Each structure stands twice: as structure tokens, then as C-alpha cells.
Amino acid sequence: MTSAAVHLDQLVFSYADTMVRFDVTFAPGEITAIMGPSGAGKSTLLNLVAGFETPREGQVLIGDMDVTSAPPADRPVSMVFQENNLFAHLDIASNVGLGRSPALRLSATDKQDVATALARVGLAGMEHRLPRELSGGERQRVALARVLVRDRPILLLDEPFASLGPALRDDMLELLASVQAERGMTVLFVTHQPEDARKLAENMVFVEGGRVAAAGKTADFFKSSGPEAFRHYIGNERQ
Amino acid sequence: MPLARDPRIAAGVIALAAIGILVGGAFVGLGIEAWRNPEGALAAIDPYLLRVARFTLWQAMLSTLLSVAPAILVARALSRHPEFPGRGLILRLFAVPLALPAIVAALGILSLYGRAGYFAEPLTALTGGTWPGIYGLSGILVAHVFFNLPLATRLMLEALQTVPADQWRLASQLGMGARSSFRLIEWPALRAALPGIAGLVFMLCITSFTIVLTLGGGPAATTLEVAIYQALRFDFDPARAVALTVLQIALTAIVVLALMRLGANTTGDANLPVARRNFIQAKAGEATFNAAAILLALAFVGGPMLATVAAGLKADLGRLAGETSVQRATLTSIILATLSATLAAILALALVTARRALATVRNSRKKTILERFTDTGAGFVLVVPPIVIGAGWFVLVRQSVDVFALAPFMVVAVNAVMAMPFAVRAIRPAHDAASERHERLCAQLGISGWNRLRLIDWPVLRRPLATAFAFAMALSLGDLGVIALFGSDAVQTLPYLLLARMGSYRTDDAAGLALMLGLLCLALMMLADRLGKETPR
Amino acid sequence: MRSPVLSLTSALAFAAIAFPATAEGKLTVYTYESFTAGWGPGPQVKKAFEAECACTVDFVSVADGVALLNRVKLEGASTKADIVLGLDTNLTAEAKATGLFAPHGAAGENVKVPGDWSDDTFVPYDYSYFAVVYDTDKLKTPPKSLKELVEGDPEQKIAIQDPRTSTPGLGLLLWVKSVYGDKAPEAWAKLKGRVLTVTPGWSEAYGLFTKGEAPMVLSYTTSPAYHMVAESTERYQAATFEEGHYLQIEVAGITTTGAKNPLSEKFMAFMTGPGFQDVIPETNWMLPAGKTDKPLNPAFDKLVKPAKTLLFSADEVAANRKAWVDEWLGVMSK
């Protein structure tokens, strides 16, 4: 799998009475944290990349491919949501297997891959559990396992660990970092936690008022010379 | 997502087209006939008709209110007490009234509240004068509530079941009492479903015919449906029939649109239902109140049914069951009802999924006409009298084909379309709640079309679909609408046979057949429940 | 998903076109449901006529007389019916106006009904009178005239039928009209207080009556015969009215299709003879219009024999029905 950059080119999207404009590039094979106040447009940005929303103007480019009007499933993208990553009535193996075949027709190899992926995220042997028998952290691990079997170059994460405790969260970040290192995916990671960004992401995109207010290396953001808006936001968050 | 890519929308469009052809074709047929003799349309509008229209609306509104308001309490009580003794049986019994021909229900109700009913003596003693029976508006209302309270209860229960278990858990954790959990949890879920349910009940009441005439006490109590029936059956005046049908649709539209404004299109919490039910712990006071609500509703609905059973037991059931004509009619009824119910469920599923798909793609923009049609619009078929559809088609195709060979297909098609709105109400809450959770995930994983139906929607919709199917079947079992105009030996169903027996002095036979019809319906309900049970894994 | 409605319809259309034409030696009779029911005259009539004509009789039944006329109207000249059996005299004018019926020839000579009703197109096969049937357990002194019915105790209720939707309902309307003439609205205004309810059809009203909801019901003079013969009870009786009783005659006619079938005239002759007429009283619960071979069951001797027969001509009914029904509505819906 080769890494691909994600480029939002002069993107304009409007919903109800809000309007967003994005013009930004995410570096290939690296993790970029997307931060910003609530309602700034972070999730909208991910939705545009994933194809849940269609822009009014502009293009979404993944690598050299224009995916602006491609349906979500046809894009080289996996996404993990904050909630509802799993179908409640299907067991864990099926939930992961859907990442391989939407018809759930799995070959022996596919099944082997599912088992391997589950083992990779620390859920070996849980194939036949139902989502409700799992903890919140374990459910997000299942979602990650599906990302592994889906094997797409782009991974979008929309506050996936927001509801997990600090220890669990660190575990998950670690898991995510190692998975990313293995696969070299381009990861866009929406979070509210500066610590997450600091630990995980090389790059940072700061979104505010439906625009990219700042972008750069994460380390630079946390310096005292970091962007004013960002420092202001962090300050607010810490109060 | 471009529209054309979504097979769900295509399915909805096809379903709408099928319904449109069925209704539209009938109007074309009658329209051609009416064109030759159009003065009936104008002559239809006279002061008497305006009185009829007023009464039609008035009784339908009262009936709706009296059916729906108590149904909220009963549905809530049933939802809060999943372990209530006999709950399953109560729910199945609640589907039986739909399958009873109106005259059977009317006679059952009169066995209790009529001049010679069981309650006549105590009521005479209580009121001083001779108990006059419930003829008039009160009788109409009692009968309509008998039919519609159980229907509304079941549909509302369906809506309440979409409340995620987590919310119940939260409510009990927060120590919410009955009042606040109603206000904060149950009411929002009900409110979304209420306009649809009330609209459905309203439409059923506005088209009431036999009940209104038999219990109404005189022609002051008449509905537009009676006038339409008269226009077609006695005067064969298609122009008047079309004019009256259009008036009936227009009046219904006004009320139903007003109802829609009252409702909120809330979608419930979209989270994964991780917790097992049930976290409701009703306090003793509330539990007593709930039990009282359930028992009162049961008594009200069960009373006339018991009277029907008592009357039926007097019949020579053994001989009846042995008669070839009865066996044949039973089989005909089952076959026709199964076909209608299957078709109704398919139509409803197509419309529900299309509506949801359209609502998803439009975001916050205004609803398109297409979405409106998949939503409330299609439900208006309920106020097109089956006799109009039947007559229209017969007129339209009589030149080219033997129309009476069409009768069975007509019956299936019309019953299916008439049962479709009920099926929609039964399916939609569960479907939309599931869609809310699954939509993005399905899009992301590319699960669509048949795969989506098979893997994602079917497991979630199995139970509501079974309910929808059972309701559609009950409705078709009791129906006489299409054959009323012409009759046909090809479609001698149980209710048809029942009325034929009643029409030739054989009242005991008719009572026996009513009992058999009720039992048949109950058996079908049990079967549907079994089919709908989620298989434990 | 295919449209099931469409595919069903087209499949049917095909099947209907492929339907074979009427075979020789076959007679198709359209009639109402209770005629062909197991207990009705149909099965015996079929057997007897088939033995006589060495042909096949095919009954096609619909709900009642009105549905029968509607069906023929809808089928038009292409109707498969040779004979239409079961219209009543209130429908004959309308039936003739369709131009779908042919003159019957000589069959009318064998029958005689009160009031000497006769017609060149339709032949009577049985008749009865409308009457108020009462429950002797509940009502010791039944009304002896229409006047007494109209002016009697409003606590003693009667269940009647709606003239807009039922034959007996129209019958009572015409009965009152023929007795009261222009004063009919006043009569209805008085009677209204005694009316328990106005049902859409005979079945509902009779059901209410046998359930005990009303001590009286509008039915036929022949109704008590059913209870006497089939249920061996004399509890339900018809009241004799001084002013006379309104007559209902049931008739049959040959269609223009049937005029080409030689069996049609044979059937009409058979219908007016004993082979048919013997069957009528105890299956159709009406009085035979022609000669019977067997004497009637003694129960029929106990029935009310009206001193006077009331009947409007078919043309009068056709011309005035709408106005009279509106007049009735005007009074009754106040």
C-alpha cells in the first residue's frame, strides 16, 4: 500500500445557514491532528473527505485521484466514528468481515485475516461475541480491526477515543500509532485533546469558523510562537 | 450521493408508481365515464352534502381523539411493564378487531351497550329512564374506539420500542419518575410517531360506513363514504362519485396536514443499543395506574369480542367447519390475505426506505415532493373508497378483458394498498432509528441494495415487519370493500360468506363464522409473532 | 423490485383474452348470491333444468339485485349472461333503459302476481310483500296499520333500512309514499321517533331485531315462514296493515346475448313451471309466481295475506326515486 496525500482544493460546502471553505493538504503517510472549537467544521472536513457530504465547489483529491463525486465506499478511505461503528446484531467477526466484503461473503483467507486483525488489536478469540458484550474501548478496537482488514490508504478518525478513560486512551493511541507505522496510512485525526495531538501527530491543522486557521508541525503549535488562535483555544480549553 | 445510485429510492419510486397506477387508473376509468355525463359532479354539492361533510369530519375527529389519547396511556403502560401477565396475548387480541367485519363488531358492542345489552338493566336502574342504547354519535364513537384504540396502542408501542435501552437505563439511574420519563423520554418518541398514527385513525374513521349507518340512529349520521357508495352502486353516477371522492380526499388532507404540523420530526438518540432491556422500575402508585389503564382497555376491547365469542358458540360450529363452502372461503381468505399482506409489506418497506434515503440526502433543505409522497402522501389511498378503485378499473378495462376474472387480483391489489399505510407505521420507527445508526457506516463500507437488506436491515426490521404483516393480513381478512359493488363467486371470502348467511336469516351461522374469523386472525397473529421473534444467538 | 400490481394486471389481461367463448349447450345465468347458496334454490333448479334440457347451467352470482344490474351494465353488450335472474320491479325500468335485454316471448303467460304486474321484457318468478315483522315476546299489541306504526309509542322501536343503499329501505319509502302521498314527509317526521336506527342493508336491521335491540323490523310477510319451518318457532310474526302492503316482485329477463341462445327461452318456460316454482317457497322464502305441483308448507297459510296490494309502476319509481329519497333525507336527517 502506497501512501497518498489528501488535498482539499478550494472546497466550498454549505449546510443550513453555515458555510465552510477548506483549502489544505494533508501529508502522505503521516498523522495529522485536526483541532478546533466545537462547531468549527472539523467533522464536516472529515465528512467531505469520506464522501458523506458533497461540496458545492472545489475538489477532493486523494493522491492523484479526484474523488469529489465518488460515493463513500468507492473512496480509498476508512473511517472510525465516535460511536456506532458496529452493527449491534452482528457478531464481532461479521462486523470486521464487512470491511472485506459488504455482502459478508468471506473466503477462508478473509476469515484468517479477520482473526489476525482481531488478534492484532488484542481481541483474539472474541469473534463470536456481540457488540453489547464488549466494553467501549473494545468496541473501538473492533473498529480498528476492521480498518486493518479494509486496508485503505486513508484513515479518518472522528474523536474515536473521546469516551474512553485516560489509561485506555493511551493504550488506544499506542495501538493506533503502531498500526499506522506498519501500514503507512495517511491519518486525519479529529480530537479535542491537545495531549493526543502531541503524542500521536506530527502535523496539526487548526480549524476555526469553517476555515483552516493554521497548519504546520504539531511541535511548532505548542511553542510559545505557535499560532495565536490555537494558543487562545488551548487556553480556553484549559480553563 | 447522487440519487440514481441509491436503489432504495428507485424501489420507492416504483412502489409509488404502482400505487399511483392503481388509484390513477380508477380515476381515469371513472373520469371517462363521468365526462359523458358530468352534471352529477355539480349536483353533488348541495346543503345536505355540506351537512354530511361536517358530520363526517366531526365524528372522525372525535373518534381519533378518543382512540389516540387513551392509547398513549395504554401503550406507555405496556411498554413500562414488559412482564405484565398476558401481555403477549393482549397485544395479539388487539389486532383482532381489525379483522372483524364492521357489522360483527357493531353487534358485539350492542350486546353490551345496546337496548337489550348486558349493561342495559344496570344502566336503566342507574339512569332512571329506559336505557336508550348507544345509537347516535356515542355509538359511532364507541365502535370507532373499539377498532382504533387497539390499533393505535400497538403502533405507539412500536414507536416506544425504538427508545434506546440506554435511555431507560439513564432514566432509572437518574431516578426519573413516571412523569418526567414520560416527558423526557417517551413523549419525544411518541410525538414523532403521533401525527402519522392519528392521521391513520382519522382516515379510517372518515371512511367509516356500516358503523356510522348502523349505530348512527338515522341518516343525520352519514359519512361521505355512504354518499359515494350510493352514487356508484345505486345511481351509477361516476361524475358524482369522483366529485365526492375528491372532496373526501381534500377534507382529509386539510386535517392530516394540520396534524403533521403538530408533530416533530425528531430522531432519537442514535447510539448503539448496548444494554439489555429493561431498566424501568415503576413505583407502586404508577404500576397500579398502568395496570388499570391496561385492564380498562382490555375490558373495553375484550368485552365486545367476548360477546362475539359467546354468540359464536351458540352456532353449530362442527357442522359449519365441515361445510365445503366454509372451508373454501377460509382457504380463499387466507390466500388472499397472505398475498395482500406480502405485497403491503413490500410496498411499505420500499416507501419507508426511500423516504429515509431521501431525507438523508436532502440534509436541511426542504422536503421534495417525492419525499412527501413517500411519507404522508401515499397514505391518502386510505380515503379513496375501494369501491371507487374497483368501479374505475372495471370501467377502464371492460372493453378489452373479462373484468370479473380480474376480481381476485383487484382484491389483492386494493387490500395491499389499503393495508400499506399501516405497515408503514409499523415499520418506520424501527427502520429510521436503525438507519440513523447505520447510515454512514453502510455508506463507508459500501453495504447497499440486497446486501444491506439482508445483513443490516432485515435483522432489525424482522419484528416490526412481522407486526406490519400481521396487521395487513388482519385488515385484508376482514375486508369486503372491493367485492361490495359487484360481488364475485371467485372471491368468496369468510366475511363475504358471513354476510351472505346473515342475509338469509342464518344469524347463528354468521355468529359462528365471526368466531372462526376472529380465531383465524388470532392464529395468524401468533404465527407472525413467532416469525418475528429474533433468533437468540 | 418489479411492480407487482402491474405484472398481476397484465398477466390477468392475458388470461382473460385467452378465455374461450361460450360453449354450445350451455346456459349462463347471472343471479344473486343467496339464490345459488347451498340452501338456496340454485342447486335444485340447476339439477332439474339440466335433466330437462340436456345442457349445462352455469350460475354466476353477485351480492344482490342491485349488484346484478351494475354488473350487467358494466359488461355491456359483451356480457356472458344469457339470463339475468333476480332484479326487482324497482330496477326494471333502469335495466330496460340499458338496451341489453330482449323481449321474452310467451313465458309471462304462466305466471300471475298480485296487481297483475306484467312486462314484455321481464318475467316474475316470485314475490312477497314488505311487512313489519315483530317479536311476539316483546310486543303484545303490534300496530294494525301504517298509521298506527307512524303514530305509536316511540319507546317501541323499529329498525329500518336506508333507501339509498337497500331494497327494503326503498320499499318502505314507496310504501309510505303510496299510503300518505304528499303527506309522506309529515308521516316520516312522526315515525322518526320510533326508528331505532337506519341500517345500510336488510341483514344489519334483521340482526339487530333478532338480537332483541328492537321489537320490530322492516322485512317481508314471508319472513315468519322461515322461522316457523326452519326453526319451528312462531315467535316472529308479520303485522297486517289495513292500508295494504307494498309488493316486491322478483323478475328475470333474457339478455341480448341470451336471445341468440335457444336455451334461454326454454329456461324462462321452465322458470314459470312447477319444476322451478316448487323449489322457491322453502329455499328463497318468497311466494311462487307460477303454478306449483306440491302444496305449500302449511306455514305459508299462516302468513299475512294483504287485503290490498300497493305498487308503483317501474316508470313512476324511476322518475321519482331521487326526489323521494331526497325528501326522505330532508326529514330524517334533521
Image: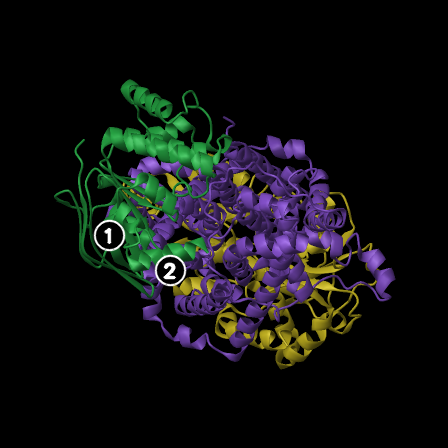
Chain colours: A green, B purple, C yellow
Q: Nearer the viewer, mark 2 or mark 1?
A: 1
Where's residue C236, x and y in %? Answer: 75, 53
- Observer-nearest residue: C292 or A223? A223
Question: What chain is tagged by disc 2?
Answer: B
Where's residue B144, x and y in %? Answer: 62, 57
Q: Which residue is mark 2?
A: B372
Hey, what amino acid is under mark 1?
Ala
Residue at image x 54%, y 59%? B198
| Secondary structure at numbered mark 2 | helix
Hey, what amino acid is under mark 2?
Arg
Q: Which residue is mark 1?
A: A215
Where's residue B312, x and y in %? Answer: 69, 41
Examine the rendered structure and indicate whether residue B500 appears above or below residue B254. Answer: above
Give the Cα distance between marks 2 and 1: 44 Å
Residue at image x 22%, y 39%? A76
Determine the image quadrant of residue B391. bottom left
Determine the image quadrant of residue A63. top left
Residue at image x 72%, y 70%? C146
Instruction: Check if mark 2's residue and mark 1's residue have beta carbons within 8 Å.
Output: no
Image quarter of the C terminus of chain C: bottom right
- Asked whether residue B307 is in view, the answer is yes
Question: What chain is tagged by disc 1?
Answer: A
Image quarter of the N terminus of chain C: top left
The circle on residue B40 is none
- Give the residue at the far left of this rendering: A64
Where's residue C162, x and y in %? Answer: 60, 65
Examine the rendered structure and indicate whether residue A15 appears above or below residue B332. Answer: below
- Asked whether residue B490 is in view, the answer is no
Mark 2 surroundings within 10 Å by alpha-carbon count, few (fewer than 14), some (14 through 19), many (20 or more): some
Mark 1 surroundings within 10 Å by alpha-carbon count, few (fewer than 14), some (14 through 19), many (20 or more): many
